[in-house]
Image: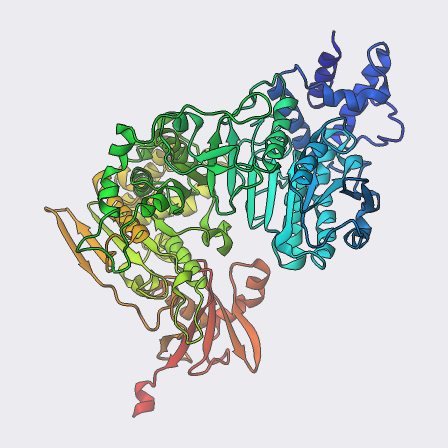
Amino acid sequence: MSKRTIVLIVLVACFTSPRVHTFDFGGLVKTTGDVAKVAAKTAKGVAENIPQLFSPEQLLEFSKQSIIGLPAEAIAATINQICSVALLSNATASENSVNITDMNYILMTEDNNVTIPLLESDDLWKNELFNKSYDTVILVTGWTSNVNEPNRAIDTIYNGYKARGGFNFVVIDTAEYVDTLYTWSAFNTNDLGQGLADGLKGLIKYVPLEKIHLIGHSLGAHIVGAAGRHFQYVTNKTIPRITGLDPANPCFNEGESLSGIQRGDADFVDIIHTNAKVLGKRDPIGDADFYPNGVVSVQPGCFDPSCSHKRAWELYAETVYPEKEKSLLATKCNSLISLTTGGCISNPIPLGFACPKTAKGNFFLKTSDKSPFYEKMEVASQNNDHLIKRWNHLRKILERSGPFCHPNFAASSETLEFLLNTCKILVIGAGGLGCELLKDLALMGFRDIHVIDMDTIELSNLNRQFLFRRTDIGKSKAQCAAAFINGRVPGCVVTPHFCKIQDFDSTFYRQFHIIVCGLDSIVARRWINGMLISMLEHEEDGSVDETSIIPLIDGGTEGFKGNARVILPGMTACIDCTLDLFPPQVNYPLCTIANTPRLPEHCIEYVKIIQWPKETPFGVDVALDGDDPQHVTWVYEKAQERANSFNITGLSYRLVQGVLKNIIPAVASTNAVIAAACATEVFKIASSCCEPLNNYMVFNDVDGIYTYTYEAEKRSDCLACSQIPRPVDVVDPNGMTLQDLIQHLCDNPEFQMKSPGLTAVLEGKNKTLYMGTVKSIEEATKGNLTLSLNDLGLKDGQEIMVADITTPNTILIKLKFQPNEVEMS
């Protein structure tokens, strides 16, 4: 049995064996809380029993080298399992907890290196060998590649900067903390990043922020990412550039709670992936992600993961040398295959040192198996018939002007380049309308698309949501839709987000040029509408700064009817300006459902709300599932019994399904028409080739085809886009209770709120009248619900601040007491 086989068995056994015998591991391990410690103890036990193979002192070094020749995926999966168990059991502490006093900066110079403790960073910045007029590069290496390793990483990169001249080259000596068992190393990255960020606070006193560049390899990439985040937190400033060289994958893979490097850690984050999904991360996580030789785990000339993992810093180092800045050119594309077959026509950009900070997306290139890594790639001619025909229709529109062009339109070939390589579109919703939108936008030339959807795929979706297959049932709509488009449309990159739109803040939404909605929720429409309005900036005269406007294209369908509209926040009518066009959501009063049902829907709601949780027909913890035939049948039978006892007719199995799932009738052809209208508006706004819709189009093909376009008017007292409080008429302030006011805000078509919380200024102090979304506040304020407005001290003209899930902003209403007839007489 070989040494490597023994170590792999040890690692697997550490999370599959129910009982592990403990061994004394000297000063390194004193407790058995960390799963990684258990693995180390077990490995040492094997070593002590087979001394002819290796000594205990060689264990850590041997474990790092042991990945050579072993199945790399098994190693990565093993480490991920160790991290998962450790995180779940909150057993991440190790003997190697970060002590900043032991960390050092190393300023590398031609004659000798200067070592300064991290806590004394000012001594380094003040050192005579540190040139304050130079740009400063700070390199953080990781596991298997730190300053104590017999490798060429640091010297190779430093030699490139030395040859270029004009740079301070600083290395962070983190060896003591990343040169241990991998799980300990991973758990230390965030604290190490914070230590680096604290040092950077001092550096910006001497060097302009724009002259700082952080680089990290492997775990070092996650350390510089954490440094960027912490630096923003403590200084409210952002590092201009962070480069990640094959950021480590184990313990930072999908589903883990360890936070790794990501876009947003700096103004510009570029990543080089060379050992995808094994030692390095696979998925795009930066502003610009480079994939030498494709999304692969083995680089040319490499026979083990370590070689491919270090290829990232080898490639970067080569581009630092003078006249080599543009030796490795990469093209924005969907895959290496698409690039080599001529499917990507954007201009190539340099990987590494000279990467432009405006780069966005995924970039591919081919390299040779050794330095120099430049390799001329055989790419199908970009002037072939396929590409000419593919974009010929767009060139005819964009490269010549016409009578219907927007006044600001300038015919140019650069417009197509902008659409293909720069324009960034967000699609909200990946259902019936969203699938059509993604297809249309991708085929129209938009190649940087993001999609958000929090839903999963159901069997009933498959008849019209054509991007999904039966094998996708239960999976994320956003992820499956993105995967389908990415695989079908060469050059297009769709980035999925399986979450709610409320999970992102304004920083996320600010990156897009246009946002398109294909939603079936009024609440979600109102929320994104409010978010875009809150992002507006204003000139000194109060007018809207047009550069802060992100256009919103909204589409909706119901059966054979649909609509499309163009919203320029702050300038044209918004969602809330026309809220009365949306029918209020049907809610049945509980007293009617329980005591005097009149409709078949009342019977269904009674079974759903009262009988199901009371009788628990399929078990206590089983939720009612509208897609489960057994559940629907049970509800149907119980609802039929109740309907019969109240002489109610019209109950059917289909109606039960519709009520349980709140089904909105959907017709595939209507989705196609509205999506085409929305995509056309996106194209018109992005290119300025034509005046956009002004601003509301309705479509109806119930009996023939009917369309009508009109300008929806902007309301001066709009809840969302106006600064004027919305008046609420109160006829009887003595008789109207706070509960009545809340009910009015929910039922009135002009408000359509869901769970409003009310706050007012009374006697010079803010007072929460009612807040139902926070249990403790709800308990303290529910007594106000039965009090009249007068009893609460609310006066005529009183302004009340209202918070609701339908908007991210606070809404102002103004009470307007109406004189009653007695007072008038």
702 left or right of 61 in image:
left
Q: Quadrant of the N terminus?
A: top right
Q: Quadrant of residue 532?
A: bottom left
**In front here: 573 or 386?**
386
219 left or right of 484 in image:
right
- Looking at the image, residue 64 lies above or below residue 558: above
Residue located farthest toward the top when viewing the structure as drawn: 1
The residue shown at (31%, 45%) is 413
The residue shown at (84%, 11%) is 50
9 left or right of 390 in image:
right
The residue shown at (70%, 37%) is 158
Query: Residue 167's spot in the image, x, y percent?
Result: 68, 46
Residue located farthest toward the left when viewing the structure as drawn: 704
Query: Residue 482's spot in the image, x, y percent?
Result: 40, 35
- Looking at the image, residue 51 lies above or below residue 322: above
Asked whether residue 754 is in view, the answer is: no
The residue shown at (38%, 47%) is 423
Q: Quadrant of residue 38?
A: top right
